[in-house]
Image (cartoon, rainbow, N blue to C red):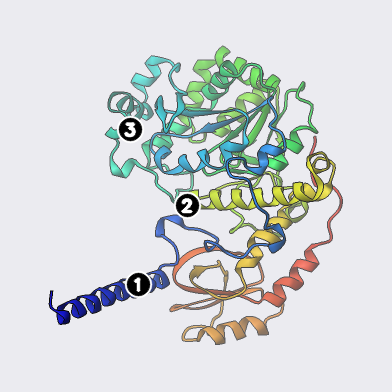
Amino acid sequence: MPAFLRSTTRVLALFSVLALFLIGLHLSSLSPFPEWRLPHLMPGAAKDKDLAVDIAPGTPPCQQLGQPDDVVVVMRTGATEIKDKLPVHFNTTFRCYSDFLIFSDYEEIFEGYQIHDVLADVDSTLKQTNEDFKHYERLQKLGREGLQADELHGESYESGPVGKNDNPGWRLDKWKFLPMIVQSLKLRPEKKWFVFVEPDTYIVWSNMIQWLQKLDARKPLYYGSEVQIGDDIFAHGGTGFVMSRPAMKMGADEYLKNAEEWHARTAAHWAGDCILGTALNQAGLPLNWAWPMFQGGNPADLNWEDAKGDWRLWCTAAISYHHFTSFEIEDMWGWEQQRIAHSLAKQGKQSFWHTADNILHHREVFKEYILPNITEPRHDWNNVCEGIVPEGEGMSLDECRGECERRKGCLQYSHSPSGCNVSETFHLGTIGEGVTSGWLTDSVMDWMEHMHSCQSRDIKIS
């Protein structure tokens, strides 16, 4: 090849590499994270540097705490969401549990794990006559491959006022709760505790196992975040709930003894967790209220000042959160493992169980997990400022920040083409196209110091 051609080829190759690099850099600056993630944290966001310790590959720190063999975690999912929402748990949360069950509306081996059909033993006449089971019957014939694109859940926070009521998989979900109690007890009759979760539930496992040790498994106990529909009070399913073996037996007996009644009630209702709570109450077992340890929201959206009576969210141990995407589960789990590893490195396994500092409170989640993300304004981000500035249309971002600085108690602001919003309530928020959000960090720090007056009570036992 002539010398000038070799030279030209080298120049073109170098130019191509440089062009690809610049294109990649440009795209990365336009899109800091994939759209489907909907994260509340930037990947690699700064965390407490004191937590940085090496974790041995293959052995997450949670396993070093000891895995209680009297607890089973029960995951309730469905064929419309399993592909998108379940896999992250195989590499994160499930690695901490000594035992778990996965229930769905279709039996299969999924990525090497047994998925049980929780509706398999439900009355066949009911399945053939109730409209909600048309989706189920089609699943049994065609498998998950037979699902249409509009039937799949994907990763989303969106739902109607009573859940994803336009999705056939969601409408079928209410039928799973009571059979799930029967099947769990049948498959794991020796377990003392049953922890029920959904794929977008996050359980703070280091807290859960400490809390369960303080309870009496010989008693019929039913714990969760209290919700009320009409006169019925029950544990919210997505938040996670806990039942002892005697409680499980009471629920299973009530359902099996009066199956027709509970099928009729379920058909007329939209919330299976409410039906379960009502059945337990009819059997003589009311709910033990476990809010604010159990949270129905994501830390990005919580009202950190929330309280009921003497119980303040800020001061209470964190046991569960809800509405997590797969990325958020992975990120939060990794952060919790770093925290456990840090404690074990300082104190050792024996001391972990006897040190109050090892109880993770909601306030620590805020300080160590949320707070590092507000040092700079965030573009295409909505921090949910509720106060509209009347003269805000046409304001610049700096002017919007100035408006917040002039207002007593203002913690954060957001700016968009429609104007300026401010708020005295803290939210991290989530992706919001065209919105720039910012926080007054000094004001947030002052607010946080004011929040710190907590009593010693942090675990609810009743």
Q: Identify the image quadrant of the N terminus.
A: bottom left
- Asked if residue 348 lies left or right of residue 291, the reply is right
Task: Provide residue 318's location: percent of width, then percent of height.
Answer: 70, 47
The residue at the far left in this view is 2
Label 3 environment density (alpha carbons within 10 Å; few <14, some 14–19, many ≥20): some
Task: Provide residue 164's location: percent of width, then percent of height.
Answer: 43, 44
Query: Which quarter of the figure has residue 194?
Result: top right
Mark toward the start of the polypeptide (3 vs 2): 3
Query: Which quarter of the figure has residue 429?
Result: bottom right
- Asked if residue 153 lies left or right of residue 254, the reply is left
Label 1 environment density (alpha carbons within 10 Å; few <14, some 14–19, many ≥20): few
Mark toward the start of the polypeptide (3 vs 1): 1
Foreground of the two, 78 or 224: 78
Q: Is mark 3 on a helix, strand or loop?
A: helix
Mark 1 belongs to which amino acid?
A: Phe
The residue at the far right in this view is 456
> Looking at the rendered structure, which numbered label has been put on residue 157?
2
- Asked if residue 75 lies left or right of residue 215, the reply is left
Q: Name the residue under label 3.
A: 144
Q: Identify the image quadrant of the C terminus.
A: top right
Q: Name the residue under label 1.
A: 21
Alpha-carbon span between mark 1 and mark 2: 34 Å
Position of residue 47 relative to residue 297, above or below, is below
